[in-house]
Amino acid sequence: MPTALVTGGTSGIGAAFARQLAARGDDLVLVARDGERLEASAAELRATYGVAVEVLPADLGDRDQVLRVAARLEDSSRPVDLLVNNAGFGVHHRLTDPDPAPHEHAIDVMVTAVLVLGGAAGRAMRERGHGAIVNVASTAGYMAMGSYSAVKAWAMTYSESLANELTGTGVTVTALAPGWVRTEFHQRADIRTSSIPAPLWLDADALVAECLADVARGAVVSIPSRRYRALMFAVRHAPRSAVRAASRRLSSSRH
Ligand SMILES: NC(=O)c1ccc[n+]([C@@H]2O[C@H](COP(=O)([O-])OP(=O)(O)OC[C@H]3O[C@@H](n4cnc5c(N)ncnc54)[C@H](OP(=O)(O)O)[C@@H]3O)[C@@H](O)[C@H]2O)c1
């Protein structure tokens, strides 16, 4: 059976990946900080889908713990066929706040950990001649809404670059750029969502199903739903000054 490692696999988008991968018969390695929740998620997945689920508690903001997960990805006796670099959170602190710690933490978890785990998986998969990596970016990466946009823009460019580096090796890399999804994300980051129009909300299961279909065909960028593909086409072709103005309006409606 193929094995998939999903970071942040206990909630929201990561949990949807875990369920759909288990439903198609993949064994799983789940990574997150909360050990009890990991055990509960694993037990439910084993009972529902009959797959093997390993839990690997780790705080991806901590270098040594990231290296433990990287070592699991490079363990040739227990190959991982799919890495989903998904763990993350919203950041709506101002860039001029005196304490840069929330931004640094975001970079640790959503840039440094993604880089280290992507590199480890890429090496191991290239050696075996097959595998797939999904990096969860965001449509926010096309906008200019603080360090979260900057981090997710990095995830997009990084994924395209890693895909280039691994071209012809049998390993594919896909950047997933979802729009707004109802998960624990907004509540955890204390982001107001009342001004977000209902049609802009995506269902986590539907977007993961689209993403896995994109991964299967080797797509480098996956933007689930027709409406977000159309919106992002407009954003990518609009003058940057218009994108900055829209970003300012969106940011101020969330504070
Ligand atoms: N929801 C949206 O609207 C949206 C839109 C676009 C992109 N995204 C991206 O989608 C990804 C998943 O977000 P979500 O919406 O599913 O959020 P979520 O429901 O809050 O889930 C986040 C997951 O990440 C784990 N996690 C958080 N910090 C971690 C850390 N330091 N180390 C290890 N695991 C950590 C959490 O588990 P523990 O707390 O137990 O560690 C949890 O399993 C993120 O990268 C996010 O930026 C979300």
Image (cartoon, grey):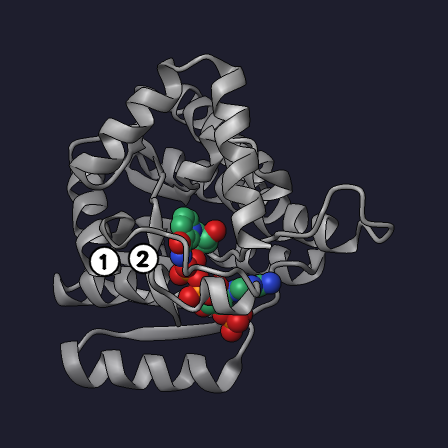
Q: Position of residue 246 (x, y in %)?
A: 48, 31
What amino acid type should be assigned to the residue bearing mark 2?
A: Ala
Say whether residue 219 is visible: no
Instruction: Give the Cα distance between marks 1 and 2.
Output: 22 Å
The residue where tag 2 is placed is 4
N-terminal of the pair, mark 1 or mark 2, is 2
User: Is residue 125 among what the camera can see?
Assistant: yes
Residue 165 horizontal side relative to residue 45, left or right:
right
Check disc 2 and report its element: helix, strand or loop: strand
Q: Is residue 23 above or below residue 79?
A: below
* Disc assigned to residue 56: none
Which residue in the protein does label 1 denote? 203
Identify whether 157 is placed above or below 18: above
Q: Nearer the viewer, residue 104 or 141?
A: 141
- Which residue is found at the position 41% from the left and 84% from the top? 39
Who's the residue at 48% across and 57% down the image? 87
Q: Of 215 and 120, which appears nearest the observer?
A: 215
User: Pointers 1 and 2 in contact (CB under 8 A)?
Assistant: no
- Residue 123: x and y in percent read 47, 37
Badge 1 marks a residue whose secondary structure is loop
Up/down of 142 relative to 59, above or below: above
Q: Label 1 amino acid?
A: Asp
**Residue at the location (44% across, 83% down)?**
37
Q: Is mark 1 within 8 Å of ligand 1?
A: no
97 horizontally vs 124: left or right: right
Is residue 36 left or right of 248 when viewed as pictured? left
Q: Nearer the viewer, residue 199 or 213?
A: 199
Neighbor class of circle 1 (other Cα within 10 Å; few <14, some 14-19, many 20+) is: some
Residue occupying the far right of the picture: 98
